[in-house]
């Protein structure tokens, strides 16, 4: 078995798909992984995949034409999901599930239907992964909070499990076209930046000045107070139910939500 | 004097009074319309809706739900803002409301505005103010987010129509399920002043759809449709009456949603029930479950309830309850049954049903596949076979299945269960007799279930 070890990102995995395909080892004899192999097994040959944006773009283009936008986006969501090491032996890792799903898709007369076949374990896994990313992104479309900095930039900090920044960036660029905003994923040290009137882009945040991010505009406190008051008043006393509240807005999101940050 | 008070009041005070006064409105959804940003102002809309936070009562906050004013010339007995009640009054200006909405929106606190109002001076005067607020938001500020607005009963149809072109969703509260109850508790409103604008909005939506076919860029009228709400438990209507009203609203008025609001006694009015145990939350929950069965599962009210069985089972959800009374339909073969048949199986939601129909085309599904697809097997297992065999050896027998289903704690949702056993006491005593159990036996039963699982 030849195992292609690729970077854990959409580009990385797509490059892995490209290399595995081009290697001509045959799909049965090739597998992908994003995890550093901890004990090299005797019968496997590990091949290091160098992420290559050209190869990745080729794969992306093929998938988009053959699968259609919707299925392609679900594949991307799956690729952005957090890799969870599974305890069950026969579940594949993320990259390999995506690879096998793509192989199946391209062998079908209608590739866009590939994610219907949930009876196939690897398709099912891609479905679960994409749903996990989608759900978290959808949660954050609502739970994310911008704070206005001194210089007028809207700044939001998040701590997501999956890499949801591309999806959030797209949503907010469409929603707030006339704002300068920045969404910062502190877990990945990655940010989506949107300068007013243009598209958004992702960037590393090694040189972020933490102090600049704490200088809020004069009105910011005012609106936070108004919002918190609204939040408190709108609850019906006779129905108070903290358990339901925590179930609907899980604790792991609350650290970045302004109305939950008061003592 | 009153005007002076308002002038002095700051934004914080107004926001407090007017959100407090709005909190008994149920609908806070931002669903039903997909709209891209326009590149200029701010805002877009996402059809499934987005919840931005959850208040201490666990309800979703999606919109800035607020009254324009809590001044009111009406005297509805159940309402905190009725003209006779002694509460602080306030009113926004359209400008103030615009500022709060926009500033909240750009910080991503909200998905848009849900504007309702008490009736100040006259229905037309109030509707006019609401119209102006929406006009400023949409035109002066280029706000493109979600707006849900109430139509004021008794307002001029021209004003209602003008407002509808600026809103995404409009609603007129039915308030109470029957005309008699309305006459009793809301003497200033009548079935007529509620149903007439509802019909008007429905007709305009239908016409607008035609216009949009002819001319894609025609202005859109209430694109997310119309909704309404009813108060549950303030008046003696049974579930059968309530669900029949809801069904005819869906069928005859093409409503998008009917909301049910467990009555909270705020006024302690002599005509209203005291409800010592709090609002009837479990009943409200069952009504919502049944409402989903009507909208997504092709059920009819006559299948769920009847004159002889006018209330929902408190122990089982309406779908399980239906299935138990129709065991002749079961077991259903997963790999062959039609989508419609699958929809009727407890534990299979409409999404799972869709996935099953698609997935089984490639290879037959087994129970493990069903679990991964999202089927709730602990409910479904009594009613289904996979390639001819059942998951466990079970009996297709009402008492046996009922007993097992009742062990499933989620039949009564955790949050309601834990809000105290007192919920049970609201239900019709007759219903409890059906089960031959007294209150204390019910409590024992529930307690032992908790231990056994």
Image (tube, grey):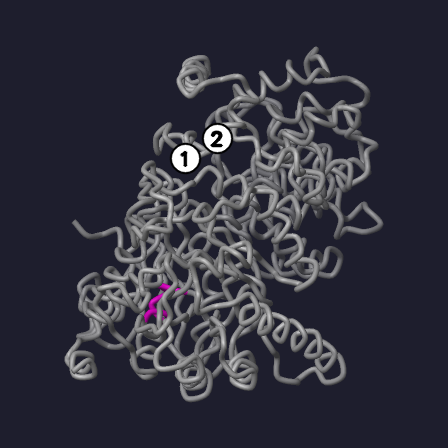
Q: Are marks 1 and 2 in contact (CB under 8 Å)?
A: yes
Residue receiving disc 1:
B416
Say above or below: A11 vs B279: below
The spot of residue A2 in percent (x, y) is 64, 34
Say above or below: B154 vs B237: below
Which residue is depicted at the point 19% across and 52% down? A262
Say above or below: B172 vs A70: below
Q: Is residue A104 left or right of residue A168?
A: right
Residue receiving disc 2:
B412
Q: Is residue A196 left or right of residue A12?
A: left
The quadrant holding residue B388 is top right
Label 2 sits on a secondary structure element that is loop
Label 1 sits on a secondary structure element that is helix
Q: Which residues are magenta?
A: B104-110
The spot of residue A237 in percent (x, y) is 28, 48
Count of residue discs: 2
Q: Is residue B339 left or right of residue A207?
A: right
The answer as to whether the residues below labels 1 and 2 share one chain is yes
Front-lying residue, A238 or A158 = A238
The spot of residue A195 in percent (x, y) is 39, 76
Q: Can you see residue B410?
A: yes
C-alpha gap between disc 1 and disc 2: 7 Å
Front-lying residue, A85 or B306 = B306
Chain containing mark 2: B
Which residue is depicted at the point 62% across and 76% down? B200
The spot of residue A214 in percent (x, y) is 19, 64
Crowding at label 2, few (<14), some or many (≥20) Cα neighbours within 10 Å? some
Chain containing mark 1: B
Crowding at label 1, few (<14), some or many (≥20) Cα neighbours within 10 Å? some
Identify the image quadrant of the N terminus of chain B.
bottom left
């Amino acid at each position: 078995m030849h195992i292609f070890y690729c970077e854990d990102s959409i580009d990385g995995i797509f490059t892995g798909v490209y290399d595995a395909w081009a290697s001509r080892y045959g799909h049965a004899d090739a597998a992908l992984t994003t995890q550093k192999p901890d004990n090299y097994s005797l019968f496997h040959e590990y091949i290091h995949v160098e992420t290559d944006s050209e190869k990745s773009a080729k794969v992306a283009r093929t998938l988009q034409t053959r699968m259609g936008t919707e299925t392609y986006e679900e594949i991307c969501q799956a690729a952005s999901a957090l890799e969870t090491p599974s305890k069950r032996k026969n579940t594949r890792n993320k990259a390999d599930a995506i690879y096998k799903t793509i192989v199946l898709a391209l062998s079908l007369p209608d590739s866009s239907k590939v994610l219907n076949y949930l009876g196939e374990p690897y398709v099912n896994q891609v479905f679960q992964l994409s749903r996990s990313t989608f759900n978290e992104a959808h949660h954050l479309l609502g739970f994310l909070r911008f704070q206005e900095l001194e210089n007028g930039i809207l700044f939001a900090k998040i701590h997501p499990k999956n890499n949801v920044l591309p999806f959030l960036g797209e949503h907010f660029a469409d929603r707030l076209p006339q704002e300068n905003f920045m969404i910062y994923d502190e877990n990945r040290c990655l940010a989506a930046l949107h300068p007013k009137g243009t598209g958004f882009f992702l960037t590393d945040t090694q040189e972020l000045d933490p102090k600049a991010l704490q200088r809020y505009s004069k009105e910011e406190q005012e609106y936070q107070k108004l919002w918190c008051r609204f939040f408190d008043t709108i609850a019906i006393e006779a129905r108070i139910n903290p358990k339901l509240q925590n179930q609907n807005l899980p604790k792991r999101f609350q650290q970045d939500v302004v109305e939950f940050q008061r003592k | 004097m009153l005007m002076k008070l308002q002038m002095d009041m700051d934004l914080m005070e107004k926001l407090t009074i007017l959100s407090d006064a709005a909190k008994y409105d149920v609908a806070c959804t931002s669903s039903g319309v997909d709209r891209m940003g326009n590149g200029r102002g701010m805002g877009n809309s996402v059809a499934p809706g987005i919840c931005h936070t959850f208040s201490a009562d666990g309800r979703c906050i999606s919109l800035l739900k607020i009254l324009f004013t809590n001044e009111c010339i009406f005297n509805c007995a159940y309402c905190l803002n009725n003209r006779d009640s002694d509460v602080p009054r306030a009113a926004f200006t359209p400008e103030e409301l615009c500022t709060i909405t926009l500033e909240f929106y750009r910080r991503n606190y909200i998905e848009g505005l849900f504007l309702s109002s008490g009736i100040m001076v006259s229905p037309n005067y109030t509707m006019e103010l609401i119209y102006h607020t929406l006009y400023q938001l949409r035109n002066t500020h280029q706000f493109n987010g979600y707006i849900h607005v109430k139509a004021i009963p008794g307002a001029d149809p021209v004003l209602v129509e003008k407002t509808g072109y600026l809103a995404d969703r409009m609603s007129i509260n039915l308030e109470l399920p029957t005309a008699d109850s309305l006459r009793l508790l809301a003497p200033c409103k009548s079935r007529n002043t509620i149903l007439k604008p509802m019909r008007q909005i429905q007709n305009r939506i239908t016409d607008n759809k035609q216009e949009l076919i002819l001319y894609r860029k025609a202005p859109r009228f209430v694109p997310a449709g119309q909704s309404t709400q009813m108060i549950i438990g303030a008046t003696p209507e049974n579930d059968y009456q309530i669900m029949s009203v809801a069904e005819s609203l869906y069928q005859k008025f093409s409503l998008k949603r009917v909301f049910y609001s467990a009555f909270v006694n705020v006024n302690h009015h002599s005509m209203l029930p005291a409800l010592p145990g709090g609002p009837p939350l479990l009943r409200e929950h069952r009504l919502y479950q049944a409402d989903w069965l009507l909208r997504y599962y092709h059920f009819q009210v006559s299948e769920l309830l009847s004159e002889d069985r006018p209330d929902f089972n408190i122990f089982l959800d309406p779908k399980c309850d239906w299935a138990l009374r129709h065991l002749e339909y079961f077991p259903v073969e997963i790999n062959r049954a039609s989508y419609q048949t699958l929809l009727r199986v407890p534990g299979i939601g409409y999404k799972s049903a869709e996935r099953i129909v698609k997935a089984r085309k490639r290879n037959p599904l087994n129970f493990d596949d069903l679990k991964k697809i999202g089927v709730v097997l602990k409910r479904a297992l009594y009613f289904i076979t996979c390639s001819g065999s059942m998951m466990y050896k079970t009996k297709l027998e009402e008492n046996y299945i009922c007993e097992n289903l009742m062990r499933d704690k989620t039949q009564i949702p955790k949050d309601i269960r834990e809000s105290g056993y007192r919920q049970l006491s609201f239900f019709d005593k007759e219903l409890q007799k059906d089960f031959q159990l007294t209150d204390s036996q019910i409590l024992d039963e529930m307690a032992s279930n908790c231990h056994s699982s």
